[in-house]
Structures are given as C-alpha cells and as structure tokens.
Image (cartoon, rainbow, N blue to C red):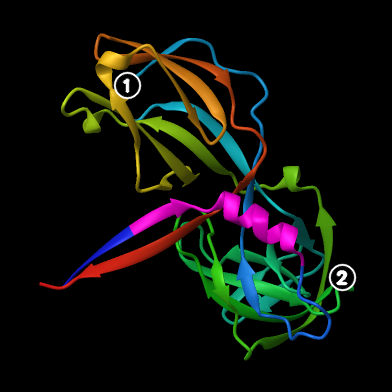
Amino acid sequence: MDGMARIAFVGAALTCAALAGPASGAEEPSRHISTPWIIAPSGALPGERALAGGDFVLKQRLLPMGLAELAGPVTMGSNRFEAGTQFFKAKSDGASIYCRPYVPDKVLVGCLLDSDSDGDFDEWFDVVSQTKGLPSVAQKYTKKRKPVSGAAYRQVPVTSMTDEYFVAIERRNYFNIYSRESFMIVFGREGTTDRLTAPVSFKSAEMPKQLTILGAVFTAVAERDGKMVVTVQRDMPMQPFAVVKTTSYGFY
C-alpha cells in the first residue's frame, strides 16, 4: 500500500463559507475551526528580472484574520507564554479563538478560547496543522478543553504581527522536460515552506507567455543564459488563502 499526499488551494471555498454566516442560535456550535490567511498586496511591482530555478516571481505577506496579544503570562500544559505574545485569530462558530504554534515550524498548535468574547480567555486546547511552514488547521476541536485563568488579551492590528508568513510564485526549472516551463505556489516562513501539488506549466515555444496565478499577472518573456526573463503586470490581490492536505492510498 502506497500513500500520496496532495496540497491544494481552498481560498475560494473559504470565501463562500464566510458568506454563509454562523449557525443559527437554535443550533449547537459545530466546534469546527479553520485558519484562513489573507494575502497582503505588495505595493510596488518588481521590474524585469531574470529568474533561476527556485527564484520567486512574486513574494507577498500572509496576514491572519485577527491578532491578539496576551496582557499577562499564560501557561498551556508545559508551555508558558509571556505577556505580549501574539496569537492569530481562527475562524470558528461563536467563540473567539486565537492560536499559535508551540514551536515554530512544527505541526502542534495551541489555541485559547474566549467563550463569551469578553476579552479574557477561559480555556485552551491543541490542534494539529496540516503543514509545517504555515499553520493550516481545518478540524473540530475537542470537547475536553482545559481551563485557563487570568488570561486577558487585547486585539492589535494584524499588520503588527511579528511572525512572518508568506506566499510566493516560484519558478521550478526541474520540470523543464519535453521543453516545458513551470511555476509553483510556495508558502510558509523562511526556512520551512510547502508547495501546492499541481504546477502551472506551458511549452517553452509559447514564450512570450502571459500567466495569471492567484490573481497575479506576469509575462514569461524568454529564456536567457539558462534563466527566465519575467515582467510583472499585477501582484496578487488581497484575498483569502488556505490549503487542504489530502492523502490517497493505492493497494497493490
């Protein structure tokens, strides 16, 4: 039996889910939690550049839906977070939930829950991220949450987030077989990244070729000395960004 993992973009689906709104008051909250991110516009566009394999056409910051700072220290199991520690907002039904990885670039994520949104966290629990570089959670959280006391927090602008996450469009020249050029979407943080499974590719003979990826528009002009010359017409617009990881198995 062999397993194959695939990582796919689900930003459009998240937009539709947000428009549907929360469950009605007669229904019990679903306890479903997810961590959509927002692509921040880059502002200035880069000029014409020659890209080697692994170079980025565009690289833009990912910001959370909301951000909170602890007003005092909080202990979650064996982990202690000091005042000023930042937690990013998760999407959930009803309660306000903020999370952060216990250790950067690891999959275990700790979350604090404010059941009545009064500015004090009441409980905490763990969830697992589907990717290491970017906290990507989509699951139900446990009913067996643990109490936490004296955990006041304040909301702060998302642009003040100290952790740096990004999404980028990357040239991947090792796919250049049968005279094809390829680009991939890469995301995460410096030193730990993941990629969407499916590349965007085209025949080398089609250059100059204009492409649109995540709303960004750029032109692959030509190959020059083993590199690709590109020009960018538009950066990635502000939009939700989230991924889902699935594993399929084959039996032999």
Q: Is residue 82 above or below residue 113?
A: above
Q: Classify mark 1: helix, strand or loop.
A: loop
Q: Is residue 34 left or right of residue 104?
A: right
Res 81 quadrant in image: bottom right
Q: Quadrant of the C terminus?
A: bottom left
Q: Is residue 144 visible?
A: yes
Which residue is at 55% across, 68% downward?
Answer: 138
Q: Is residue 193 left or right of residue 44?
A: left
Q: Tell me residue 69's x, y (percent).
A: 77, 60
Q: Tell me residue 101's x, y (percent).
A: 56, 64
Q: Is residue 53 visible?
A: no
Q: Tell me residue 168's x, y (percent).
A: 49, 35
Query: What's the magenta region?
Result: 6-21
Q: Tell me residue 68's x, y (percent).
A: 77, 59
The type of residue carrying mark 2 is Gly
The residue labelled by disc 2 is: 119
Total marks placed: 2
Which residue is at 74% across, 44% downward?
Answer: 160
Res 139 quadrant in image: bottom right
Q: Is residue 220 above or below residue 237?
A: above
Q: Quadrant of the N terminus?
A: bottom left
Dominant secondary structure (helix, strand or loop) of the stretch shown in magenta: helix
Q: What is the crowding at mark 1: few (fewer than 14 residues within 10 Å), some, or many (at least 20)?
A: some
Q: Is residue 19 magenta?
A: yes
Which residue is at 51% across, 58% downward?
Answer: 104
Q: Is residue 6 left or right of residue 73?
A: left
The residue labelled by disc 1 is: 52
